[in-house]
Image (cartoon, rainbow, N blue to C red):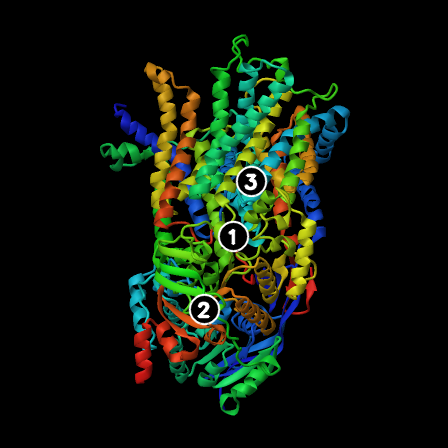
Amino acid sequence: METMLVKMVSITKKFPGVIANRNVDFELKAGQIHALLGENGAGKSTLMSVLTGLYMPDDGEIHIKGRKVSFTSPRDAISAGIGMVHQHFRLVNSFSVAENIVMGSSSEGFLIDMHEAEKKLAAFSEDYGLNVIPKAKVWQLSVGEQQRVEIVKMLYRGAEILVLDEPTAVLTPQESRELFATLRRMTDRGKGVIVITHKLQEVMENADRITVLRDGQSVATFNVRDTNPKELAQAMVGRDITGSYELPEITKCETILQLKNLSAYGDRGQIALKEINLAVRRGEIVGLAGVAGNGQKELAEVIAGLREVAGGKLHFLGKDYTGKSVRQIVDAGVSLIPEDRLGTGLVGSLDAVSNSILKNYRLKDAGRGWFINWRSVRKCTDKLVKDYDVKLTRLEAPVKLLSGGNLQKLLLAREMSNNPEIIVAVYPARGLDIGAIETVRNTLLKQREQGKAIVLISEELEELFALSDRIAVIHEGEIMGTVDRDCLDLNEIGMMMAGERKELANGRVASS
Amino acid sequence: MAGLLAVKGRALTIEKRGDISKAAMILNPILSVALALLVGGTFLVLTGHDPLEIYSTMLKGAFGSAYGLSETVVKAIPLLLSGLAVSVAFRMQLWNIGAEGQLYFGAIAATWVALFHADGSRIIVLSMMVGAAFVAGGLWAMIAAIPRAFFKVNETITTLMLNYVAILYSNYLIYGPWKDPEGYNFPLTAIFPESAVLPVLGTSRIHFGLFFGLAAALILYVALWHTKWGYEIRVIGESPVAARYAGMNIVKNILIVMFISGGLAGIAGMAEVSGISQRLQPGLSPGYGYTAIIVAWLARLNPFTMLGVSFIFGGLLVGGYTMQTSGLPAALVSMLQGAILFFVLGGEIFTKYRLVLTGGDRKEV
Amino acid sequence: MSDPLIVILFATAVTAGTPLLYAALGEIFTERSGVLNLGVEGMMLVGAVVGYIATLQSQNHWIGVFAAMAAGGLMALIHAVLSITLRANQVVSGLALTIFGTGLSSYMGKSFVGQPVPDQFKPIDIPVLSQLPYIGKIFFSHDALVYLSFVIVAAAWVFIFYTRWGLNLRAVGENPAAADSMGIPVYLTRYSSVIIGGVLAGVGGAYLSLAYAPSWIEHMTAGRGWIAVALVIFAVWHPGKALVGSYIFGGVDSLGFRIQALGEKASFLKDISPFFLQMFPYILTMIVLILITAETKKRRVGTPASLGIPYDREER
């Protein structure tokens, strides 16, 4: 009989206004990779946070290796052999890798011998085939390397059960393959791995068993042999999902966004963008593919005027906007849909009415002279909210109470109402439910038809493939090449994401 | 935050509320004052006093007679003006705790006008004094505002250091160049000419400064909630990142807001020298600039609420003086003020969070 | 008695700097854990008055110091509850602590103003070391609390940078979510650091009323608590640099009085008003703060990343 590493029975966890998990059952066997599949907001992360002691369940039982446990903190879960790798890494950036791994351990005396710890760590990580440099500072590492540190950290603590939250979201396809090979080595040693994901293909290729969550409830558990992507998709969404999008043909001639040899520095003073050349025409969506942290954020900020141009030129509609202020760039018709909706795009503690004039409060629409005419602003907001189907209780409630999907709809409504010429959308569909994702995509397509120039930054290759006229790939602040819609090839894009120039990547794919 | 008190899988936890509780918002300051009085009372008992007797003396002193009430209003005027000053800055997350020094500089500038440029009609001289006080207080705040705006230098420390410098400078003037030559060597300036003295209400000491306070509250309210500039200030205060994204000029607004903040405190200083002491003398302010911080926070930075709060705190000060005549240290008042602020701060969590018992049966506490 | 003037100046810089040093060390612990406590001035005042009263009552200055430590710790506990558990605004909470502490110390000390301390700290020459030329007089001819501060600087240095607990402390201040996920008790760490901060500020206050100016005077800290907060930034959260900074500020502080005394003899000094001399430490604090901030901004070092941000595990 197989050992049951984890058995969660009828777990319920509520948050104000939402039931994140409702009577969820879940079992993990030793030596298996178990995928936890579901849409955003299905309750996957909550369930795992309950398992790792971060949240306390309102109801239900947890058994680890047959013993009933009750965790009040992550410490309890760690000592029961459960380790979690969060989507946002829990690492101290200013610490070295070794310090991150040693911190919080309770044994081994009062003083720390960092040298000894580094040696032990090097030997340990080699044993698992996980290459980490103990002395390196975390902030100097790439995202993939940081993820390895997270995994080593958990194994070093004696984790028998490893939980990974959307681990491949930040990796190239090649790196993802490597990650699963590592995870397989771990399960071969009898450990158990839970992977939270929403990517069907990945699950089919790598998992042993799959549990599907929908609306906070567990729908079903499958053996990977006995199922297929279609069945999983249906379980996930509860209906058939539509296929790819048709991009109606439009004539694109005039270039309205142009970057010429554009360079910029990052937050730490490092070069973040190196001589970028990119041109976007009317009625065109240019997708920007790349592993997170390769300059996408900086590129979007430079276009929006939020980051200083260190070299090169920035042109809108044929005019030079290099070094111009954010206000001038906004007035030129550039709209940024920022990654951070609540915080950058919207002010959480203000209401929808106040948020609706964030970009155009200076104009006559908001009121004459020095004053704001709140009554007319309110009327406009009411229309926007209805047009974009934003669900809110009152217009006067602080927008931080809205769900991610409704926030994004409100943000889109405001930005589109200013009738921009150029749109830069940064991870616009991230973390949204299916309905909101549809709204985002349809909005972008509609804007494309209206002749706007759009830059779509995304980490979902599927999304980029579906919506883009062209895809540019960015790696370490450089454009590796641009591929037309008709010639898209997953392998080629993957290799460019890993730093191969287009010509080389193309050659490799052709020869293999 | 899981597990304030965790027992067998059950725990008392603090959970975020969906919205802000209106009831808690109104109850919080009232309960805070009551609890602070309770703490103060305990202290009085421990030091061998009868709290009921002392509190009732204070109450009678501040609100029990026409004289007491008028004195309470007199104290409320500088509190209102400097409370408004502090609140504009706080709204933008600028922790200006230099209202005390800005108040002194306003007083110094007003005195300069009164002593050396008081030729002209009363209305001209007084307007000049107000203008000079506003500019002086504003410029004094700029010393902290400029490094804050351009280099992000911690304004809490710089504004506070400037308080000490301002008070020392005013003492220098009083003991040195501005000392009244006919003042028998007392540390006082000469008394202001008639044209530099604010008119008073009837026979009371309530002076025209009251209208400065009321006007400032009204103007600030309109500016903050009904103008484009006020909208900028509120967005910057709530989320500087979003403000930048919207193309707002943060550096410029830091400078403007700090100037206004310092200027308002400066007017408080002008009102004190012109309306009350009619000369510059040591100990011009018993810490109005610090009490203003509490007033501003208790009023949740709302200009109109501040009218009521500064009246109550004015009463607290007057009560303190009454109590002092019966031999108790007036410091009890600043203790009470501190304690009130503790409870207000602590109570805020109940406007944003609620206590719940998780794990077993779900009960709200 | 024939020490050169410069040696006397340096020696007084050490005594004048010691209260700053205690307070700054305390604030380093507090801020390293991610909590900002602007109540140092209030905690020092309460420490000063409590240490003074306890010494009056017990006739023993050590009992005074212990009482001051307890008082400072209790004051800090208020801030801890407000800022850690109740997640109140840390700036305002610290200010409240200062206002409360100012009132409390005046209230408690009212009836004692002017009474001499029966058992003040007196200089003890350390054998051998105090005989060293220059160094001996500057560093080893002081009272026990100065020597204790040397020990605490060294201990804090080792603790913060070379021990397991120090690593955990820094982790909590940098990224509490990461620390929490590694099983470091975030709240416990923050509570204890804030309380240690209060205890040390209490000692700093007691030093003023039992050794530096042995008596109780209302508001006797005169902004030293705030200067200590500025010193922490100056010292980039490092105990060793806090020692250097404290002595520099101590030197400036005592220089004012020296010049006043010298003014009796030298006429050009007589023209400087004593008020301007008294302004000097405050102005210096501002200038240093501005320069250091501009500099550290360039070098991108320093501030614990989570300073001033309350931690909420279930914040989503």
Q: How far apart in space, not on screen, are marks 2 and 3 (Cα)? A: 44 Å
Q: Secondary structure at mark 2?
A: strand
- Residue drawn 54% across and 58% down? A345
Above or below, C27 against A430 in this view is above
On residue A286, which mark appears?
2
Residue B298 at x, y = what percent?
64, 42
Residue C274: quarter of image: top left
Q: Which residue is mark 3?
A: B89
> Farthest right residue?
B65
Residue B335 at x, y = what percent?
61, 36
Q: Residues within 10 Å of mark 1 (few under 14, many from 20)?
A: some
Instruction: Give a yes or no on whether discs 1 and 2 share a subunit.
Output: yes
Which of the pair A453/C13 is nearer the observer? A453
Above or below, A2 against A49 in this view is below
Q: How many marks?
A: 3
Looking at the rendered structure, the kind of residue marked 3 is Ala
Chain name for mark 3: B
Looking at the rendered structure, the kind of residue marked 2 is Val
On residue A331, which mark appears?
1
Looking at the rendered structure, the kind of residue marked 1 is Asp
In screen coordinates, is A282 left or right of C295?
right
Q: Secondary structure at mark 3?
A: helix
